[in-house]
Image: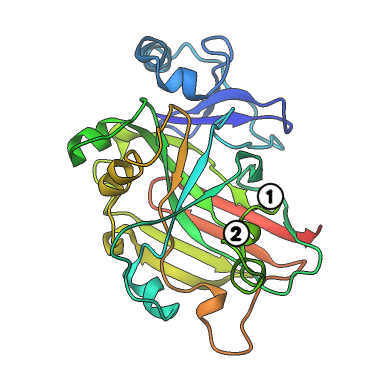
């Protein structure tokens, strides 16, 4: 299933994109797309049954905002330097263990919402990433199979980063990762049954129409299953938590001087195979 949330920010309602590309209203079946729904097999079964039976009313998608596909996100866990080619362009050795950092849930916005360039920023950068959405409470997982069994689905994350704040201002990466609007998410939460191999997905990102990132999750240093299993050793993952699994080469930081960091007015578009497409225009904060 392709689940999503539509409407004005803070007042989104649940929806489903059917096999014909028609947007369907889910508000008569479930209250929202969130961790509580993803952990409730019976409720998901009702959604699937209503969709299969053709019982869901169509929505007029014209002019309708798409919000983040997940409400009430608990935490956003991020994996850094998780593609071989991105580690090389960053001048870093492939990490021996996953590099883990957190983004606040309030950085999450819709896939086509405006991204704000922070005040004083000169190095705002782009990163297309596969995002994993957790569907079952995960603690100390032992096997890759068990890890994937705890995944509810997948979506696209744009891990926007301010490199000066992240690298040159001291401390941890948090200052460069948690600016407002720095995690567009969506458009859809695609349930795990529709993604048979998360290590076989193409990722692409364009800036002002120019292809900047063109990679595959096959190049991840730590595959999705290993990432989920690893993170569960250090923190409990709950239904509705999100893991951003890293970005391929092609970020602005890895380009020759003058590096083409993002500015107000730029347009970024992102796509992951089978998971949809995002588009954001940048403006000054």
Q: Point out the tag, 2 or 1, that comes first from the N-terminus.
A: 2
Q: Residue at x 42, y 58 (%)?
A: 246
**28 or 39, which lies in front?**
39
CA separation, marks 2 and 1? 8 Å
For this view, does 251 lie left or right of residue 216? right
Image location (x, y in percent) of residue 245: 40, 52
Residue occupied by mark 2: 160
Q: Check if mark 2's residue and mark 1's residue have beta carbons within 8 Å.
A: yes
Tell me, for residue 21, which label it has, or none: none
**74 or 40, which lies in front?**
74
Q: What element carries label 2?
A: loop
Q: Is residue 199 above or below residue 62?
A: below
Image location (x, y in percent) of residue 197: 24, 46
Q: Residue at x 80, y 69 (%)?
A: 120
Name the quarter where the N terminus is drawn: top left
Q: In this view, does 191 lie above or below 106?
A: above
**200 or 98, which lies in front?**
98
Residue occupied by mark 1: 181
Q: Decide: few, some or many residues near mark 1? Use Cα within 10 Å; few <14, some 14-19, many ≥20.
A: many
Image location (x, y in percent) of residue 35: 48, 24
For this view, does 102 lie left or right of residue 262? left
């Amino acid at each position: 299933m392709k689940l999503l949330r539509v409407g004005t920010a803070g007042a989104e309602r649940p929806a489903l994109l059917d096999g014909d590309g028609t947007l369907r209203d889910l508000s008569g079946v479930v209250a929202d797309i969130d961790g509580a729904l993803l952990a409730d097999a019976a409720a998901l079964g009702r959604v699937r049954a209503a969709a299969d039976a053709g019982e869901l009313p169509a929505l007029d998608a014209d002019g309708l905002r798409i919000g983040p596909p997940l409400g009430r996100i608990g935490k956003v866990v991020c994996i850094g330097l998780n593609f071989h080619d991105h580690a090389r362009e960053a001048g870093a050795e492939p990490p021996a263990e996953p590099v883990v950092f957190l983004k606040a849930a309030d950085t999450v916005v819709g896939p086509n919402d405006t991204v704000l360039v922070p005040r004083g920023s000169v190095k705002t950068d782009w990163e297309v990433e596969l995002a994993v959405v957790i569907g079952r409470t995960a603690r100390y997982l032992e096997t890759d199979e068990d890890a994937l069994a705890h995944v509810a689905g997948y979506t696209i994350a744009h891990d926007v980063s301010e490199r000066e704040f992240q690298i040159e201002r001291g401390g941890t990466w948090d200052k460069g990762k948690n600016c407002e609007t720095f995690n567009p998410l969506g458009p859809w939460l695609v349930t795990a049954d529709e993604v048979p191999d998360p290590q076989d997905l193409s990722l692409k990102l364009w800036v002002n129409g120019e292809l900047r990132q063109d990679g595959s999750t096959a190049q991840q240093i730590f595959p999705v299953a290993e990432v989920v299993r690893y993170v569960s050793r250090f923190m409990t993952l709950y239904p509705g938590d999100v893991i951003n699994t890293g970005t391929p080469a092609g970020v602005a930081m890895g380009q020759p001087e003058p590096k083409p960091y993002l500015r107000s007015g730029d347009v970024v578009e992102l796509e992951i195979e089978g998971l949809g497409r995002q588009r954001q225009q940048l403006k000054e904060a």
